[in-house]
Amino acid sequence: MKITWLGQAGLLMETGGKIILIDPYLSDSVAKINPLNYRRVPVEEQFLHIKPDVIICTHNHLDHVDPETLKYYLAGEGSVMVLAPAAAWEEVRKFGGKHNYLRFNRHTEITLGDIRFIAVKAEHSDPHPIGVVIEAEGKHYYVTGDTLYNTEIFEDIPEQIDVLFLPVNGVGNNMNMADAKRFCERIKPGVAVPMHCGLFDEIDMNEFGYEPKIVPQIYQEIKYI
């Protein structure tokens, strides 16, 4: 699987001829509400013109469900499978069109060809946030979504996680680096990828203490093997 970090919590995954977007935020929408959270890195416009097969929105916050970004993928005539829990589902389906908007609440599983998407618990300020485990190419990729450390989460997680993506910024109801490290030590992934830093702040993700880890570079492929 080819995986590219889009900044904040955004990921672009390419596998089996399918293109998957998770929580894409490619605008400066948040700054209109909170000027302190202005975008530190310019938008790379090439990513606005891809044709995704699947979009996953883990919860209904503007840096995860951003109309200014999603319009590039959902305002046209194509058909995209959009997976989103409760409040996020209500928001994305306003785009209408021929897209397949699926309520992707905790414990929901959806299979597309050789790819399976599993919604798992997250603990965040949205009342119905999720993480997602993606089964593809014989591996388990776990994207926690925005979350705090919550012991109930571990009930949902498969025994083997090959690549784990998680927030480490420590604000906005996300894990800080200490709790994110404990989270990784509990799951024991093949490799951890810290995220949700560097777009609204000056946090250095190299300070994240878990090993093995890969500190991603925005708009670049994450080389996890």
Image (cartoon, helix red, strand yellow):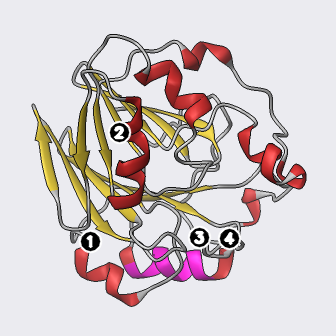
Looking at the picture, how far across and down is residue 25, in whole percent? Answer: 61, 38
Q: State the separation of the CA atoms marked 4 and 3.
A: 21 Å
Residue 93's tag is 2
> Can you say which quadrant of the picture contains the N terminus?
top left
Quadrant hosting residue 34: bottom right
Looking at the picture, how far across and down is residue 140, in whole percent? Answer: 26, 53
Look at the image and give the residue range highlighted in magenta: 179-186
Q: Are marks 2 and 3 in contact (CB under 8 Å)?
A: no
Q: Residue farthest to the bottom?
A: 151
Q: Residue at x 60, y 13 (%)?
A: 46
Crowd rating for badge 2 (residues with CA inside 10 Å; few <14, some 14–19, many 20+)? some
**Which amino acid type is marked by label 2?**
Arg
> Can you say which quadrant of the picture contains the C terminus?
top left
| Sequence-earlier tag: 2 or 3 | 2
State which mark lies toward you, 2 or 3: 2
Quadrant hosting residue 58: bottom left
| Sequence-earlier tag: 1 or 4 | 1
Queried whether the magenta region covers residue 81, the answer comes back as: no
